[in-house]
Image: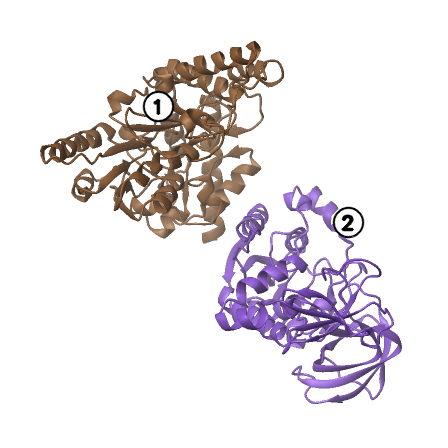
Amino acid sequence: MAKTVFVGMSGGVDSSVSAVLLKEQGYHVVGVYMKNWSKDLPGMKCPWAEDLADAKRVATKLDIDFEIFDFETEYKQRVVDYMLDEFKKGNTPNPDIMCNQEIKFKLFYDISREKGADYIATGHYANSKDGKLLKAKDDNKDQTYFLYRISKDSIAHTIFPIGDMLKPDVKKLAAEKGLDNAYKKESMGVCFVGDVGMKDFLKEYLNTTEDKEKYLKPGQIIDRETKEVVGFHDGAIFYTIGQRHGLNVGGGLPYYVVGKEMEKNIVYVSKNLNDDNLWTKTLELKDVILRETPTENMVVDVRLRHRAKLEKAVLKNVAGDFEKGIATAVLEFENEIKRTASGQSAVIYVDDVCLGGGILK
Amino acid sequence: MLDNDFIYLDYAAATPVDSRVFEAMKPYFSENFFNPSAPYLPAKHVRRIYEDYKNELAHTIGAKGNDLVITAGATESINLAFTVLKNFENANCIISKIEHASVREAAKNLCKDVREIGVDKNGLIDLKALKNSIDDNTILISVALANNELGTIEPLSEIAEIIRAVRMDRLSRNDETPLYLHSDASQAMSLIDIFVSRLGVDMLTINSAKVYGPKGIGALYVGHGIKLSPITFGGGQESGLRSGTENVASLVGFATAAKIAKEHVNGNRKKYEKLSKLFRETLVKNLDGVIEPKFLGNQKKQLANFAPVCFDGLDAERLIFKLEDEKIYVSTGAACAASKGEKSHVLTAVGLTDSEIAGSLRISMGKTNDEEQVKTAAEKMAEIVKKELERIHG
């Protein structure tokens, strides 16, 4: 009897080809569209209905069953509210990482298993083997950065059908199969991802009088070196450490955001690319998850942004329950690294295995 | 006209431009491109042509050119019609529960008190309920001549009769508050010979895109003495109601298309009655009794080119995608509603269950369809339906 796979289908080319491959491999495939977000933002139409139709079209052509899992409530509670809380603290959270942890590899996984799935599958560029999360073949597309927080159990029951393919080959295969999705514009996941989208998103959701008064008000931009007020911003909440653009400060060398004071609504900037706040050799992590027990002072590779190059580091002082993702740890880097904003993730690799990672304090 | 390898059965959504219409439009893009309001002779010539075609268009519905406001389509026409409410305080309006979104939204946005009248299982408006919901503040009643999902032809002249009685009653009490009847005739024009006086309407929306004319142009017939408010402000074209340089080429196209439609109304009806019968019979026969298709609406009171059908328990969207693979194009409900993933308010209003609504397809035939195409489509549809049933029930 064929094993049953529930494949998350977003309507994009990657998950569509994943469904095709699973079907060809002889699985009993059920396509699932996860409805996480359907709200339009000002000037931005949420394409969920089109995405859903695109996913369903592929499922229909493959003659597989197709279901819609409505996760809007849970997505709001577990991803959106988390993001708002983090932004309010002055941090820069990553919605995709949280979505994978809470929605795709928890809710979707649990419900699919309840409904009889032996495996789930997604169109991520990643691999799973013997319960381990491995980098994708396509180095340029590898998405393990976004997947580092998913549980060991879900990895053991997840198939990544395109993990051994290169993106151009995925598109080619889609075109060969006559899937219109081959020509679809790359989606960025949820509608509000991206710089502009995030700002609109925050403006829309910081809608209580209290939030508006606290976060959506003009404040000073201060040059950390000269202590001078060099401009004004429309809310410190919109700014991220290391950010270069959008400061409305004209002329000369570019300014970089080097700090924020949420209570006073002040954004600190610097023209000095060597500012201490921009560089570091040490990162302190919280919410650390590791799927294998680390050795003491273990040498690891670390990725600080999706697609960023790997940095050598030593993983130290792991304390707390790392299986549950609530440990703390320290990363000592071999070279000075450009500091990323608190709330962002440092993802830890040993060779091709994504061991886990943590969130920057 | 269409030399295609596909079978198109969604004429209620869009029609291809007739080659004669296209030919008639051509001179007004690059040769006679002048602004009709410009002062030199070639421009005056264009103005004359515009007015001539406007008259011809008006004649197809038994009106005069001056009675028409040319707009950018049915949605604009409908929005313009509803501006009549702006002149009255506490005005209410009445629409049917199965009106197109353009009517529902225009009503919602321009009127505080919108009264929706139910329909029977075939989509025919409840005249008694309509009559009862009229009061002294009712200014506008808007009911489509033919529904866009079911093709149901509404009893407009009977509604007009009710309205006449109300008017008489108001006048007898020295109440000069008007009561107007507007109808959206977008779907009906190529199958019903329209005369505004016979229908008894005060305002009528017509649409080029559904009668083998270009998209983006429509008109509102406005009876004498009806005061509307502008929907765009500018150079004062179209009696100041719809400012903006006249779209001469498109109006020429629309008028030409409307004339052709009018000439063929009777022939069309006979042709589609035959094709519809063939479609229905072929479908039933080829389904071998595995499922009983439910044809929606009452054919006697339905546009002849409509054959909406419901397969209870099946997913219409899947059928569409499967048919699309066979290059047969059909739709569910209104294209605009379908793209939003909403449940059809029309099918809800005629009392279909959620499962029936999910299994409903809109088949609407047109010029390019012949017996062979319709038969092929019905056979393929039956085949696909049977396969889907097998997939579900194993």
Q: In the image, is B139 to the left or to the right of A88?
A: left
- Determine the residue positioned at 82% across, 74% down: A225
The three-letter code of the residue at mark 2 reads Pro
Residue where numbered disc 2 is placed? A168
The N terminus of chain B - image quarter: top right
Identify the secondary structure beneath mark 1.
helix
The three-letter code of the residue at mark 1 reads Glu
Q: Name the image quarter holding residue A301.
A: bottom right
Residue B90, how many percent across, how many down?
25, 46
Q: Chain A is shown in which shade? A: purple
Q: Chain B is shown in which shade? A: brown
Farthest left residue in view: B172
Residue where numbered disc 1 is placed? B273
**Residue mark closest to the camera, 2 vs 1:** 2
Chain label for disc 2: A
Q: Are marks 2 and 1 in contact (CB under 8 Å)?
A: no
Chain label for disc 1: B
